[in-house]
């Protein structure tokens, strides 16, 4: 069980696999007023930065599930590094359908809502693990500006403009499924640069270390085309945020 190889190559040096920065992740942790000992479930936990830093800074107890063996291994190493290995557990596996044995105070899916077929399905899945009074976190893109053409939407790696809402409609959509939006932390273009531009140096170094790998052609093609695609499309049109929700 693994994710497509291009991600494990391009994002092997990322601690956060999203346009949110370490500072904004810390802001989010504070904004949620996390109490020591609260349980946090993270579906698609990546390299574990959210759970590990919140365990260190707020004393949370966390479980993360991720399909990537590499990211899961990195998450465990990060927990050791931050001295929180007794507070957080990282499981390698498919998070689709995952429900916690013990209900949690925070149930999160930050930038992986495809695991339950989109935002609505992911909220429903997370709700099954949530204790009364708990908070759901959803990390999701939205359009900063509507793409002028479907080609620009595709350039943002969406299938079509209808894949995402604009921010007001995204916020309203949470209400339509019965949730209050109680907090949010939004990424900005600098955060997008940290996520996207950091892949380029990683890919370049990987190419230098693996010139004869079967995959080198694909990585080379990505490195050649990504900066322009990103600047023309994602950076201009796509926003991203983490939204904190409580059932009405
Ligand atoms: N939340 C993390 C990672 C976001 S990237 C962060 O913000 O850093 C999306 C993550 O979803 C990747 O780590 C990928 O390995 C994971 N993923 C993709 N499909 C998955 C699935 N079916 N089950 C669990 N994790 C999955």
Image: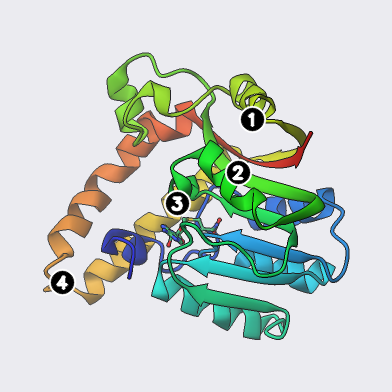
Instruction: Tell whether circle 2 marks a residue whose Cβ is less than 8 angstroms from ligand 1.
Output: no
Question: Which mark is drawn over residue 211?
Answer: 4
**Image disc number at residue 142:** none
Instruction: Tell which tag, 2 or 4, sits nearer the viewer.
Output: 2
Q: Quadrant of residue 43?
A: bottom right
- In terms of depth relative to the viewer, which is nearer, 135 or 147? 135
- The answer to whether one can see residue 167 in this image is yes
Asked if labels 3 and 2 touch by Cβ distance under 8 angstroms, the answer is no
For disc 3, the neighbor class at 10 Å (few under 14, some 14 to 19, many from 20) is some
Q: Which mark is residue 123?
A: 2
The vertical placement of 139 against 16, above or below, is above
User: x, y percentage for residue 181?
Assistant: 75, 34
Nearest to N terminus: mark 1 or mark 3 = 3
Q: Where is mark 1, residue-wise?
A: 177
Front residue of 121/171: it is: 121
Q: Residue at x 54, y 65 (%)?
A: 15
Q: Quadrant of the N terminus?
A: bottom left
Q: Earlier in the sequence, mark 4 or mark 1?
A: 1
SS label for mark 2: helix
Asked whether 38 or 23 is in front, the reply is 38
């Amino acid at each position: 069980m693994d994710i497509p190889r291009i991600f494990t190559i391009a994002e092997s040096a990322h601690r956060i696999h999203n346009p949110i920065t370490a500072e904004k992740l810390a802001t989010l942790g504070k904004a949620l007023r996390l109490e020591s000992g609260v349980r946090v479930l993270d579906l698609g936990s990546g390299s574990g930065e959210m759970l590990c830093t919140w365990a260190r800074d707020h004393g949370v107890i966390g479980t993360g599930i991720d399909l990537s063996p590499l990211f899961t291994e990195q998450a465990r190493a990060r927990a050791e590094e931050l001295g929180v290995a007794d507070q957080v557990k990282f499981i390698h596996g498919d998070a689709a359908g995952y429900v916690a044995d013990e209900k949690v105070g925070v149930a999160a899916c930050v930038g992986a809502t495809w695991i339950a077929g989109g935002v609505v399905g992911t909220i429903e899945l997370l709700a099954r693990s949530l204790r009364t009074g708990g908070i759901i976190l959803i990390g999701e893109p939205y359009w900063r500006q509507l793409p002028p053409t479907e080609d620009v939407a595709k350039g943002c790696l969406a299938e079509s403009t209808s894949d995402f809402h604009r921010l007001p409609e995204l916020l309203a959509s949470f209400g339509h499924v019965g949730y209050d939006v109680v907090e949010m932390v939004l990424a900005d273009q600098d955060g997008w640069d940290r996520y996207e531009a950091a892949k380029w140096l990683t890919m370049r170094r990987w190419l230098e270390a693996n010139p004869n790998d079967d995959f080198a052609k694909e990585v080379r093609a990505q490195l050649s085309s990504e900066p322009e695609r990103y600047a023309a499309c994602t950076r201009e049109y796509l926003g991203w945020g983490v939204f904190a929700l409580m059932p009405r």
